[in-house]
Image (spheres, helix red, strand yellow):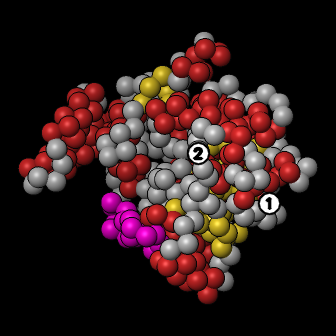
Amino acid sequence: MPNKMKLGFDNDKYVREQTKEIRKRAAEYGKLYLEFGGKLMNDNHAARCLPGYDPNVKLRLLQSLGDQAELVLCIYAGDIEQKKRRADYGTTYEEETLNLINAMKEFGISVRGVAITRFDGHPATRAFAKTLEDAGISVFYHYPIQGYPNDLDTIVSDSGYGRNDYIPTDKPIVVVTGPGPGSGKFATCLTMLYHEVKRGKTAGYAKFETFPVWNLPLMHPLNVAYEAATLELRDENQIDPHHFLAYGEIRVNYNRDVEGYPILREIWERMMGGECPYKSPTDMGVNRIASGIVNDVVVRAACREECVRRYSRVKADFDAGIVGTDMLARALTVMARAD
């Protein structure tokens, strides 16, 4: 346990503020589909960058929502076929999905089921679905959509989102998460919005993702450390241009959300038949991680160490011939930003 004087983060304060914000957003809709990005448990990157951060604080957060929330897990069929593994623990995405389900049970969090996204019908995918069903877990199938994400006529139709299985839920907050990036969380949320609208119900969408931190400076070491942690994904932090145009305010987001926002806005307006309530990708977020920072100096120092650690790992991979000069150069550039 680190010395108390060197703690930079207060978990209790964070859980209070984050729970409050999620409940506030949920109150705006009859049902809220909350895309939960990042690592739901064992978030050791956040723990290294925020001394004092509980790696499983998100489970405490879900517990704090009580009987108002339930969980849907997503896993991409291609990740099952390819036996994709988490870089930190080496577990496959199937194993991680089962680990998440078991952890939810231990924490008393309701799991509605697992959505297998871009289902391809291959034997490995069917075998995993049977494993889930044998364990009493409901399985739902979502399919590839031709022309995604640009053919909006097909996407927002019974041949697109409408073809995917509807996932019946009872609680006002439905947390949608997965074992890793690319699991299909966003498309699952929009699929459910489509089905809710078809049923004449009111529902909304929001996004919870710890990093980057929208209300810290672009070059704050905590945001730079996020780039260091996602070198393989080539995520890049940037000022949210949509937010600046709408409000004249500087907020931090990252390239994938900034690029994807116009598509979300178009899909939302087609489904809902009205103007999208979110003027920017930052508007979609409910992240309150900055509220838990109690010592910025300690956090900055820890994040600089994390950037050096990430660079050292990439340098070792480069020396071993695992990665090329482009990755090494990117790691060096990101590390330099944290100074």
Q: Amino acid at mark 1?
A: Lys
Residue drawn at 13 percent across, 48 percent down: 318
Q: Position of residue 169 (x, y in %)?
A: 78, 63
Nearest to the observer: residue 165 or residue 258: 165
- Tag 2 residue: 148
Magenta span contains residue 81: yes
Quarter placement of the C terminus: top left
Characterize the local packing of mark 2: few (<14), some (14-19) or many (20 or more) Cα atoms within 10 angstroms: few
- Provide the secondary structure element on which disc 2 rests: loop
Quarter placement of the N terminus: bottom left
Numbered range of the magenta stretch: 80-95
Left or right: where 248 falls relative to 97: right
Q: Amino acid at mark 2?
A: Tyr
Q: Position of residue 225 (x, y in %)?
A: 34, 39
89 versus 205 height, above or below: below
Residue 279, located in which quarter of the rendered image? top right
What type of secondary structure mainly makes up the magenta span?
loop
Residue 107, located in which quarter of the rendered image? bottom right
Question: Is residue 292 visible to the viewer in this orientation of the structure?
Answer: no
- Tag 1 residue: 171
Left or right: where 61 falls relative to 217: right
